[in-house]
Image (cartoon, coloured by chain):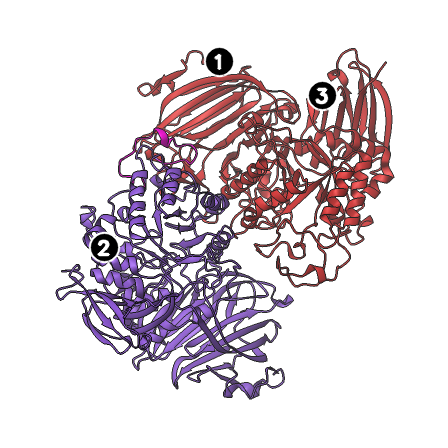
Chain colours: A red, B purple
Amino acid sequence: MITQLCKFLSLVFCLACATSAFAKQLFSSPDGNLKMDFFLSSEGRPTYVLYYKGKTVIKPSGLGFVLKNSDPLLEKFKITTVTNDSLNETWQPVWGEESVIRNHYNEVLVALKQADTNRRMSIRFRLFNDGLGFRYEFPQQRELSYFVITDECTEFAMSGDMTAYWIPGDYDTQEYDYTRSRLSEIRGLMEKSISNNLSQTSFSPTGVQTSLMLKTDDGLYINLHEAALVNYPAMHLNLDDRNFVFKSWLTPDVNREMAYMQSDCCTPWRTIIVSDDARDILSSRITLNLNEPCKLKDTSWILPTKYIGVWWEMITGKSDWSYTWDFPNIHLGKTDYDHAKPHGRHGATTKKVKQYIDFAAKHGFDAVLVEGWNIGWEDWFGNFKEDVFDFITPYPDFNLPEIRDYAKSKGVKMIMHHETSGAVRNYERRMDQAYQFMVNNGYKAVKSGYVGDIIPKGEHHYTQRMVNHYQYAVEKAADYKIMVNAHEAVRPTGLCRTWPNLISNESARGSEYQAFGGSKPSHTTILPFTRLIGGPMDYTPGLFENDITKYNPDKKSWVNTTLTNQLSLYVTMSSPLQMAADLPETYEKYLDAFQFIKDVALDWDKSYYLEAEPMEYVTVARCAKNTNNWFVGGTNGEIPRVATIDFSFLPAGQKYIATIYRDGKEAHYRNNPTDYVIETKTVTNKTKLKINAASGGGFAISLVSKVS
Amino acid sequence: MITQLCKFLSLVFCLACATSAFAKQLFSSPDGNLKMDFFLSSEGRPTYVLYYKGKTVIKPSGLGFVLKNSDPLLEKFKITTVTNDSLNETWQPVWGEESVIRNHYNEVLVALKQADTNRRMSIRFRLFNDGLGFRYEFPQQRELSYFVITDECTEFAMSGDMTAYWIPGDYDTQEYDYTRSRLSEIRGLMEKSISNNLSQTSFSPTGVQTSLMLKTDDGLYINLHEAALVNYPAMHLNLDDRNFVFKSWLTPDVNREMAYMQSDCCTPWRTIIVSDDARDILSSRITLNLNEPCKLKDTSWILPTKYIGVWWEMITGKSDWSYTWDFPNIHLGKTDYDHAKPHGRHGATTKKVKQYIDFAAKHGFDAVLVEGWNIGWEDWFGNFKEDVFDFITPYPDFNLPEIRDYAKSKGVKMIMHHETSGAVRNYERRMDQAYQFMVNNGYKAVKSGYVGDIIPKGEHHYTQRMVNHYQYAVEKAADYKIMVNAHEAVRPTGLCRTWPNLISNESARGSEYQAFGGSKPSHTTILPFTRLIGGPMDYTPGLFENDITKYNPDKKSWVNTTLTNQLSLYVTMSSPLQMAADLPETYEKYLDAFQFIKDVALDWDKSYYLEAEPMEYVTVARCAKNTNNWFVGGTNGEIPRVATIDFSFLPAGQKYIATIYRDGKEAHYRNNPTDYVIETKTVTNKTKLKINAASGGGFAISLVSKVS
C-alpha cells in the first residue's frame, strides 16, 4: 500500500551519511490528496508542512520540546533513519457510528539523533486520506531515560487569518459556549467568552482548546486535536496572532512542569483532519484509528444504554441533591442523618425513584440514573474537602435494597453516581469498595463527576496526573465490568476504542447550561466538529420544557432550542449512552414527540453525513445496528433554513415509512419552541425531501422498512 | 481529683459577663509542682504561662492561628466558659516500656469566642505531674466550618538562653546528628549541622525539630513535642533568637498552606515535659496518654519481634538491592528480568536468604527481613517515577514460595519490605494487593520506606497530606492484621497507643549512618530524650564490626561505638521490634557478646531510669514482661565515665545472676571498640555496682533470678 511517491525509499533507509540528500521528505496519503514534507531546519529543528490538494494546510512548523534541567529537544538534530510503512485494514468497534471502521494510512517514522547530546527521538507520521496524525517517540536510552517536559513546542502554522470556532483555553473546564471569529479576533473576544464555572483556569488571551475547528476563506475545513491521551497532560493551543501560528500548550502541574517521562515512551498523537467538505470532518475516524485496539477480551457486558434520571429536577432547582440543612458541615461516618430533620427538597427519595423506574419500564428505557442518593451533598464542593463522599451510604429516604429490587422486577437497570468533588485521592482509596458495591447491587454503569477544583490545590482537571487518574478509573472499572461516563474529566481522545467501557463523557458544555442561562442555539451544530471528534458525549438531550421557571420560579433560564431540535440531537450527537433528560411529567404532555426518543437507536451499522457546516447545521443519517431501521437527525443553528434530505443512502428497491418530527411554521427557539409537526411519508432511495428548520430548530426522522 | 487551686471554679462557669474577674486562670498539676496561667492579653490574645516548682518554664506565650482568606484567630477573643476536669486512671498498652501506664492530669477547657466574627475556638489544657499538653479545638459552627491554616502561632517563650539539643528543622528528613548549643548559637551552627540527605528541605536558620530537648542553667529539663499528630502537618519550631521564643512552624504544602480544617476538629497536642531530673523526661508517658485509647479490638496478632535481615550488606555496599545493569530504566510489567544478565551483586538471593533463615532459627530470632527482593531497584529513586515498585513481583533469583516454605519449616517469620520511593499514589493504589499478598504468604510485618522526594513534587514527608497517608497505611494494615514499621515517615507522636500495629518507626538518624560516615558517639544518648519521646525506633542496633571497609573496601566509614555500647541499645532504645543488624558471619565471631542480643526482651512490665543526661549517658533497667528477668542497659556518650548501678529496683529478698557485658579497660569507640568483658555476679536489691563506660561505650546486663 505504499504510494508511488514513497516507493523510491526502501523500507528502512540509513541516512546517517546522506542527510543532505533527504533534506526534504515528501510523503502522501493513500489517495494522494494529502501531502506532507518533513525536513530539518538550518538549525536542525524537525519541521513539517502539510498540503491538501495543493493548498497549504500547515505552513512549515517546528517540532520539539523544552526540558527541565536539560538541553532542549529542539535543534541540532540529524536524521538517522526513515522508515516507511502502511496499513489498510478494517476493525469493528464494540459500539459507535459504524460497525466497521477502515484504518488506512501511509506511515513514516523519522528517527532523529541530536548532535552533542546523542539523544534519540523519533517522530511517527501517519497520513490518512482525511488527515495527518503524528507523535513523538522516545526510545529507551541511557542518554534520555527520565526527563521532564516543561514545554512542548509543536507548531501548527496556519495559512492565514482564517475562521476559528473556539472556546477559551482552560486547565479545568471545557464548559464554554463557542465563539466564531477570525484568528486575529480571538484576543479581543477572549474575555467575554469566558463564562463562570465552578473550576476554571484560563492561561492566555489567545489560548484555545482542542479539538479546534477552523475554516479557511478558500473553503478548507481543518480540525486540530489529539488522540490517545494517556499519562500526559492535555494539549491546548496558544496562538501567535501576528503570524497565525498555534503552539501546543500543555496543562501544567503546580510546579509549572508538564510531563514526567520515562523512555521508552511516546506522546499522544497530534491530529490535523482536513477536507474541502465539512462532512468529511464528521466522518473522519482518525482519532479512533490512532488509538490502540480494544484491550478487553470480553466486551459482552458493554451495552448501549438509554436512560432517564433523577437529575434535571436538581439542575433546575426544583429539588435538591442534599437532604437536610441541620448541619454546618458533614463528617462522613459521624454526622447523624438518621436523626436529622429533612429539609423536604431531597430529590432522590425511594418514592420518586420508583416513579422514575415505572416511567422507564413503561417507555422501554434501559436504565435510571439517580443523583443525590448518597450522603454528603450538603457541603459537597468548594471546600477542598477530602472525605466528601463514601460512594456507598444512601440517605435515610433512599432505600437502596428496595429500589434495587424494584428496578430488577421492572427490568430496569440503575445507574450509579459517583461525584468526587475533585477529591481524587478519596475516590481512589474508596474505588474498589465503590465498584464492588455496584457489582453487589447490580449497577452496570457509573456516572462519575469531578465538580470543583481538584485536590490537592494547584492540580488541574487536565494535568498529566489527572489524565492518569481518569485512565485508572476506567481500567479498574473494566476489572469490575463497569461502564464509565465521566463528567468534568478530560475531553476524550478516542480512548473508547481501547477501553470501550468508557461509554461516554461530558467534557463540554452540556444540556445543563440551558438551566444556567442557556446555550447558544448554534451550540450543538459545532459540538460534532469539536468535542465529538474525541468520542461520544453524554450531552443529556431531550429537554421539552423551555421555560425553567415552570420548574423553579427562581431560576430564570430558557432552553434555546425548539422541541424537535432536541429530538435531532439523538442522531446528530451520537452516543451509546443517551439520556432523556426532562421530567417524566413533561414527557407525558408530549408523548407523540417523545415517541422518537423511545424509538431511536444508540448503536449503528452505518452513518452518512448529509449536510454539515460548523455552527450552522448538521444532518446525519444512521442505520441502527443489525436492523434495517434508519434514523435521520438534522440540527439547525440560529438561521432558519431548508434542509434537503437525499435518501439515496437507503438500500435500493426498498420502501420505508418515514415518521418526520419537524418544526412547525411558527417554530422558533425563543418564541415558539413547541410548534412542531409529526407526519409520515413513504420514502425510497430516490426520495428527496425538503424540510424547514427553524431558528434553533431541527428535525428527526425514523425510517422503518415497509412490508409491502 | 480537682486540686485546691481549682476548686473555687464550679465544673462549668459561664463567664460571658465576668471575664475581668478571670483575667488570670491559674491551674496546677495533681502534685502541685506544675502551675499554669491562662489569660487573654490586652488585645484579647490567648496566652499561657508555665511554672515548675516556682520556676518559669514558659514565659507568657501567645496562641492562635493565621487563616487563609479570613481574619486571624489571634486576638479579640473573650472567654466564654472555663470547664475543669481531671482524670486518674491506668491503662495497659499492648506493648511498651511498662505494662501499666498511669494517666493522671487536671484538665481545663477554655472556650473562647472572637468578637466581630463570633467564631468559637477552645483550648484544652492537661496538666500532668511531668508536663503540660494542650491543643486547640474548633467546635462545629457555621462561622468556622472549613478553614485553611496558613500559620500556627503557638509560642513557647523560653526563660533564657538555655542549652538545646537540636537537629535542623526540615520538611523531609530527621536523619541528622544532634548539636548541643545555646539557643543563641543555633543560627551560627545551622549550616554545618545540615548533612546531606536524599530528600531534605530546611526552612530557617533558627528552625529546629521536635521533639526538642532543652536544659536551663538552673537545672530544668524541658522537652517540646507534640502528641496525636493526625491529619495535620508536623510541627517544627522556629526560634526568635533575640527573645528566645519558639514559634510553631508547620510543614507547608506546595501552596504554602499548612492545614485544611473542617470543624469540629482539633490540632495535635502541644507538649511540654519538664522536670529538674532528666530521668523524668524519659519516664514521662504524656505523649502516649494524650493519644486516644487503642482502636483495635483484637490485638493478639501484634507481637514483639526480634529479627535479622538481608540489609546491612546492602547498606555497606557489600551487595546490592538491584539485580541487573542491563537496562537504562525499568518499566514494571514490561522489563524482561527473566532474560536479563544478573550483575552478580544482588543480595536477596534464595540461597542467601535461606542462610539468614538458618541463622535466625539457630539463634532464636523471630523473623528475617529481606530488602531488594522485588523488582524495580535498578532505578528506584530520584526520578519522580510513579510505578517504581509493584510490591508483589520477586526478582528471578528470589524464589518466594521456596523461601516462604523454608522459613515456615524453620519456625521463622519473614518480614516484608515495601519501599515506595515517595511514590505514594502508586503505593496507595497497590496497597490492598500488597497487603493481601503478605497475608497469602504469611508475612506479619512490613517495613515500609519513603526514600527520596515525595511525588508529586512539592509535597513533603511531613505535610498534612503525607501525615494522612502514613495513618492510612497503618489503619489499612490493621485491617489485614499487619504490623507496620515505617521508615522515612513522619516522626511518631504516640499514635502507637491507638494503633499498636505501628510497631516501630525510623524517623531519625539510624544505625545505617554508621556506614555513611558515622554518627556522633553521643547520638544514642540523646535519642531517648528526643526521637523516642513519640514512640519506638527501629534503630537497628547490633553493629559488631566497626570497620565498614571490611565489608566494602570502597566504603570508608566507622561505627562510632564500642561493641557493648551496641548491646546497651537493646535496653536503652526500647522497641518491640529490634534488629540485630550486622552480618551473621560477624556475629559468629562474637557469639559470647551476641548472647545478650539473643537473651534480651522486647516488651516490659516495668522500666526504671537509673541515670540520664542528654548527650552524655542513659542507664535503664527493665523487667521483661511476665517474667522475673531483668535487663539493664547503659549507653555512654563521648566522655568516659563510671556508672553506678543501684539495683534497688529489684524485688527484695531475691538473688539474681547478673551477666555483665561491659567495655574493657582499653575500650574506645575509635581505637579499641571490641575490647569488652563479660562477667557474672550475684546481685540483690541491695547491690550497688560501679561499671566503667568507655568513650562511645556502654554496658548491658541480663539478670536471671537465681534458684537458690
> Label 3 to label 1, Cα distance in Å?
35 Å
Chain under disc 3: A
SS category of the residue bearing label 1: loop
Task: Identify the residue position indicated by label 1 in the image.
Answer: A2
- The residue closer to the viewer here, B246 or A332, is A332
Q: Is residue B330 left or right of residue A116?
A: right
Q: Give the residue at x 80% y 21%.
A: A704
Task: Identify the residue position indicated by label 3 in the image.
Answer: A626
The question of residue B647 being in magenta is answered with no
SS category of the residue bearing label 2: loop
Q: Is residue B92 left or right of residue B146?
A: left
Q: Is residue A143 above or below residue B136?
A: above
How many residues crowd mark 1 within 10 Å: few (<14), some (14–19), many (20+)?
A: some
Chain under disc 1: A
Task: Identify the residue position indicated by label 2 in the image.
Answer: B517
Residue type beneath disc 1: Ile
Residues drawn in magenta: B329-349
Asked if badges 3 and 1 are on one and the same chain, I answer yes
